[in-house]
Image (cartoon, rainbow, N blue to C red):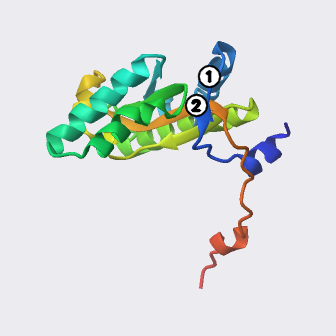
Amino acid sequence: MDALELLHNRVSCPLLLEPAPTASQMDNMFKAAMRAPDHAALRPWRFMVVEGDQRAALGDIYLKASLQDDAELSEAKQKKLRNAPLRAPVVVVVVAHKTEHPKVPVSEQLITVGCATHAMLYAAHAQGVGAMWRTGAMAYHPTVMDELGLADNEEIVGFLYLGTPKVVRQAPQVDVESYVTRWEVS
């Protein structure tokens, strides 16, 4: 696939099925992440792969966290939370590992982790793997972070859901000029 074709046509795939990406495909995604722009080569990321029965365990963590916030959650909401990680054969928890640095502010480190995740999305698409980057309340919940073993200087940037697309979607056409201005000194 041509690089520009890839960049112009990647779409999120919310409906993902088995089979999961192969070990080789996953390795390619992680290699792509390592090429993200990274001031001072801090590599402020880490990736937790959740697959198989561990996805159900992640769903239990979501439920535990949510019940702490609202003990009266409906059965439907509880089921939805428990099943959320089961929406794909593989979930990669993308973690920002933030460090104090005299030249690289934390905001830049978070952008770098976002770029690494973005590179993984494109590497997935290039290999025919469906991907969806999700966040939501569970990405920011202290109980989820604690249960996943995050350190005080870490935070979840997102959950990358990976699998075989149930439906092949076409990228919508966007009027690029609507988002571009030309700055001029007056």
Residue picked out by circle 2: 162
The vertical placement of 135 against 94, above or below, is: below
Relative depth, front residue between 35 and 154: 154
For marks 1 and 2 on the same chain, the one whose residue lies earlier in the sequence: 1
Cα distance between the residues tagged 1 and 2: 7 Å
Q: Secondary structure at mark 1?
A: loop
Q: Is residue 35 visible?
A: no
Relative depth, front residue between 38 and 72: 72
Name the residue located 62 percent from the left edge and 75 percent from the top edge.
Answer: 183
Where does residue 15 sit, x and y in percent of width and height?
A: 59, 41
The vertical placement of 45 against 157, above or below, is: above
Name the residue located 41 percent from the left edge and 39 percent from the top edge.
Answer: 157
Q: Which mark is residue 20?
A: 1
Q: Are marks 1 and 2 in contact (CB under 8 Å)?
A: yes
Task: Classify residue 28 as left or right of residue 41.
Answer: right
Q: Secondary structure at mark 2?
A: strand
Where does residue 53 sit, x and y in percent of width and height?
A: 43, 16
Residue 174 appears in which quarter of the rendering? Answer: bottom right
For the residue carrying disc 2, how many other residues have a C-alpha within 10 Å: few (<14), some (14-19), or many (20+)? many
Q: Which quadrant is the N terminus positioned in? A: top right
Where does residue 166 sit, x and y in percent of width and height?
A: 67, 38
- Residue type highlighted by circle 2: Leu
> Residue furthest toward the top?
23
- Residue type highlighted by circle 1: Ala
Relative depth, front residue between 67 and 162: 67
> Residue furthest toward the right?
2
Name the residue located 31 percent from the left edge and 45 percent from the top edge.
Answer: 77
Q: Which quadrant is the C terminus positioned in? A: bottom right
Where does residue 111 sit, x and y in percent of width and height?
A: 47, 44
Task: Classify residue 46 as left or right of residue 173.
Answer: left
